[in-house]
């Protein structure tokens, strides 16, 4: 009698176990983390560059900047990025030999090109948390003024003319990536960019009565919003 009883009970036992297992599966909470399979991303961005014109207002004024970046995941939470920013703006033409309040004699165009490379550290590693991935970045690069000499500079003696030239950039900042799907990512960055303003030779004239360094490092805040595609 024992064998036939077990045989008849087997289907019922199987049904009970199936219902119990299904109930356990329904109670499992999906993980908020998602592994990022793609190792590369690229896309455009736009932002506001709060440029510091320096002690004598020689440098570029704040304005809108446009750019593009490429990123590569290298190991764990680390990634490499390269970017280029085009920053059309203006600067004052300053004559320190005039009295205070009348030293700005003109305003001219600038067209800065900023090229950089940086190391990125993702706080969630190669994963997103509820689709979000905060990170910090550090790096450096070079800046150039594509506009060159302007007509307004002719109002100054040659030794008093400011030239942005080629300047080294130092970069430190952070941001947040938000997944818009399996491939597209929205991104916001806030960074501090340092660059050097060279003092015109004429400003070093001791007869002007200024104690002026040969160059000045200024900090410039940059906030950007962008869209990237992962592949």
Image (tube, rainbow, N blue to C red):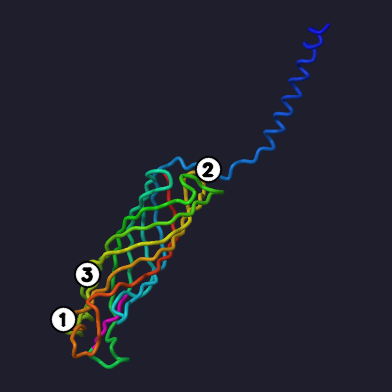
Image position, residue 183 (x, y; %): 47, 45
Instruction: Relative to 21, say whether 229 is above or below.
Output: below
The residue sitting at 28% across, 72% down in the picture is: 110
Q: Residue 225 shows which numbered tag? A: none
Task: Give the left or right position of residue 131, taking residue 200 as reference.
Answer: right
The residue labelled by disc 3 is 165
Residue under numbered circle 1: 158
Looking at the image, tell me whether mark 2 or mark 3 is earlier in sequence order: 2
Please determine whether, in this image, residue 19 is positioned above or below residue 73: above
Q: Secondary structure at mark 3?
A: loop
The residue where tag 2 is placed is 34
Magenta span contains residue 95: yes
Give the quarter of the image for residue 88. Answer: bottom left
Say above or below: 24 vs 201: above
Give the answer, above or below, for where 52 lies relative to 186: below
Start and end of the magenta stretch? 90-96
Separation of disc 2 and disc 1 at Cα? 60 Å
């Amino acid at each position: 009698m024992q064998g036939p009883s077990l045989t008849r009970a087997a289907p019922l036992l199987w049904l009970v176990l199936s219902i119990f297992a299904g109930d356990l599966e329904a109670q499992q909470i999906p993980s908020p983390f998602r592994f990022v399979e793609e190792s590369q991303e690229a896309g455009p961005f736009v932002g506001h560059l709060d440029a510091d014109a320096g002690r004598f207002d020689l440098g570029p004024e704040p304005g809108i900047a446009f750019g593009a970046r490429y990123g590569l995941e290298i190991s764990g939470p680390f990634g490499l990025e390269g970017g280029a920013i085009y920053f059309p703006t203006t600067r004052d033409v300053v004559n320190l030999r005039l009295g205070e309040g009348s030293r700005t004699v003109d305003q001219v165009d600038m067209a800065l090109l900023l090229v950089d490379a940086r190391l990125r550290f993702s706080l969630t590693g190669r994963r997103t948390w509820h689709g979000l991935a905060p990170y910090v970045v550090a790096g450096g690069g070079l800046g150039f003024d594509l506009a060159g000499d302007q007509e307004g500079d002719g109002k100054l003696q040659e030794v008093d003319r400011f030239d942005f030239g080629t300047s080294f950039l130092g970069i430190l900042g952070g941001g947040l990536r938000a997944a818009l799907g399996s491939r597209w990512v929205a991104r916001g960055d806030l960074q501090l960019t340092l660059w050097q303003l060279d003092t015109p030779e004429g400003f070093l004239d001791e007869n002007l009565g200024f104690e002026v360094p040969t160059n000045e490092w200024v900090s410039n805040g940059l906030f950007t919003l962008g869209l990237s595609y992962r592949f």
